[in-house]
Amino acid sequence: MTAGRVEVFGIRHHGPGSARALRAALEEFAPDAVLIEGPPEADAIVELAGDPGMAPPVALLAYSPAGAAGAASKDDRKAAFWPFAEFSPEWQAIRYGLAAGAAVRFCDLPAAHQLVPMEREDEERPEQDDGERPEEDVRLDPLGTLAKAAGYDDAERWWDDVVEHRHEGPSPFPAIAEAMAELRETAGLSRADPREEQREAHMRRTVRRALKEGFQRVAVVCGAWHVPALRAKVPAAHDDRTLRGLPKTKIAMTWVPWTHGRLAGRSGYGAGVRSPGWYHHLFAAPDRPIERWLTAAARVLREEDLHVSSAHVIEAVRLAETLAALRGRPLAGLDEVTEATRAVLCEGAELPVELIRKRMVVGERLGAVPDRTPMVPLQRDLQAEQRRLRLKPSALEKEQDLDLRKPTDLERSRLLHRLRLLDVDWGLPTESRSKGTFRETWTLMWRPEFDVELIEASAWGTTVRDATTARAEALAAQATALPELTSVAERCLLADLGDALPTVMRALADRAALDTDVAHLMAALPALVRALRYGDVRGTATGPLRTVVDGLVVRVCVGLPPAVSGLDDDAARDFLGRVDAVHGALALLADDGHLDRWRAALESLIARPDALHGLLEGRITRLLLDAGRLHDVPARMARAVSVGAAPARAAAWVEGFLSGGGLVLVHDEELLRLVDAWISGLPDDAFTDVLPLLRRTFGAYAAAERRAIGERVRRAGAGSGPPRPSGGDVDDKRAAPAVATALRVLGWEAP
């Protein structure tokens, strides 16, 4: 029996030229076994890559079932991805081997070892006097070293020129292997990385095993850096010692959809590909790629109603090819094509270039896996719900408007709210363009890591509803503050979790009965009112919730006076937000009894203003004015901003009163006159102190409100307003700077 032949093909991950050259080399070599850099645990599911339902980009996902279920946070999870695109050499090797009937296996260090963190050995490494480690630079960026030796300042451009952009000629793999061998030898690596040694030892072991099993033509597809190590004559005993006693963990493997955006180097799970859409184009369109690319770019711009003619495309192709020739490149690369697009198709504008970058250069594409792919029951249940409700996942951001009066839209809303309870934020709620309570607007975008989060959430149950119910009950048990519990109750109603609601409501009622902090009660009330108000819209039973709300309103109104006494500036500002939130919540609830009780409590507060911070007094005065409960507001304001009042307290009162909007000054000339007279009469030092407050107050108004107030002030200065103070003529020249400053505060430019 003759010894088998082994060919090692060094590739760059996710390279279209490498993928095309590898496919040709494999067809010429005709191996009966293909070994690929990747986790061996995936050998059992590699045949799924040949299923018609498998559409790249996809990724192998290795996860620790125990680690996923018990992870306290996203940082604690044990999971790893091995992504593949259509233009990935490894993917082409898998598809070739499956189609040719060859054995397809993975040869990298098992994920069971890789997911166990290695101990850091930084302190054991000898330090160099100059602080540099050139051998580390070579190991981390071998392509950068070769590019620099070739006179390139960009490793991507060098690799594109020598491999990715070449469609004909001899196989590049012998030259790549020779270059890497020279690099590893001349770099003089003082010591190999321990994990790298383990990986290469396991690759060699896998090759020996394949030969021992009788395979005659073995093809090994791995990163180019590893080629010399796999060709080296290393004794099996050495590799056995390297791999002996490695710690391991239990691992499960599956395929999951991936996206081009997640292949980009800037993404959290990136694979180092800056332009996956461009690489996909180079692989899918080997003939006339520049013409096809620029034609597609013109189509994208036309879809946005931008005028781009055929002549534009022709001139852009000429410019890209000319730039490539001037730079000595075999084919125009992405840099040249982008410059031609900017100069010709976009006529120098950057926004259209950014549009093309987003849609084409990155090119969001979401892969798919077949139905028989191993999944946890929770993933399968979600897929069934997505099909039933016709909510197809997409890698592109998509806005979804839901009308809760329609049964299908209501079910979609409940599903999205349930997923958010499981920390799977496939949909994020946004402000609806419609003001009706029956409308919801969501922004949907599927991300690959959601599969990991679903695996983690499967510890709570096998269906989305069951898992969410268990999760909500756990959140209620863990909550330590009343606002946390009210948030859980609101989310249960939005998600229609009737089974969890009794448990949550019992915890909520118990916590509300024991909590005596009025601030906590006020913070909890708005979420409960929203849940009560919109629960009716969704057809959810809210009886127990109404009992809790009724009790909270009474306790807030009774406990409010002592809670707001003697507050400093920071505490008063914090309480101002709580007062506004409760006031808005009770207005939403539209219960006349609760509204009367709340307004009576506010009236009792301003009846003894000495104990009340000026900010709160002013705001409460405004709320009661808007409710039609006060008829002496000008007199109250006059007292608040009188000469005897401290400027700081007067300024706080005005800020609180005006924080609800400036229309009251537009429509009430007496109030405007009082504010104007108070500002005009401030001493210089007091005016300087309160100016930031005034700018903050008036700066929060809409431009139209500021303009209207400025017009009223200008007309008042022309004689229609209050009379000028007696005591002599006013020097208009000296007064002009002060008038200009006051007008700027009001948002009006002085003439």
Image: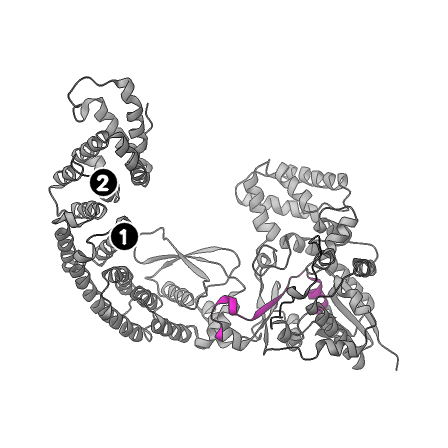
* Label 2: few (<14), some (14–19) or many (≥20) C-alpha neighbours in 10 Å: many
Residue 316 x, y percent position in the rendering: 67, 39
Outermost residue to the right: 2
Image location of residue 501, percent across then percent down:
31, 73
| Three-letter amino acid code of the residue under disc 1 | Ala
Viewer-closest of 595 and 204 = 204
For numbered disc 1, what is the local secondary structure? Answer: helix
Q: In which quarter of the image is the N terminus?
A: bottom right
Q: Residue at x 61, y 50 (%)?
A: 361
On the question of residue 369 being in view, the answer is: no
- Please identify the quadrant where the C terminus is shown: top left
Q: Is residue 323 left or right of residue 540?
A: right
Q: In which quarter of the image is residue 228?
A: bottom right
Report the side of 606 relative to 267 (left or right): left
Identify which residue is drawn at 14% across, 39% down.
Answer: 639
Mark whose residue sits in front, 2 or 1: 1
Q: SS for tag 2?
A: helix
- Is 290 in front, or is 202? 202
- Amino acid on which disc 2 is placed: Val
Choose between 676 and 83: the one closer to the eye. 676
547 left or right of 740 in image:
left
**Residue range corresponding to the magenta coloring:** 70-94
Mark 2 to mark 1: distance in Å?
A: 18 Å
Q: Is residue 652 above or below residue 182?
A: above
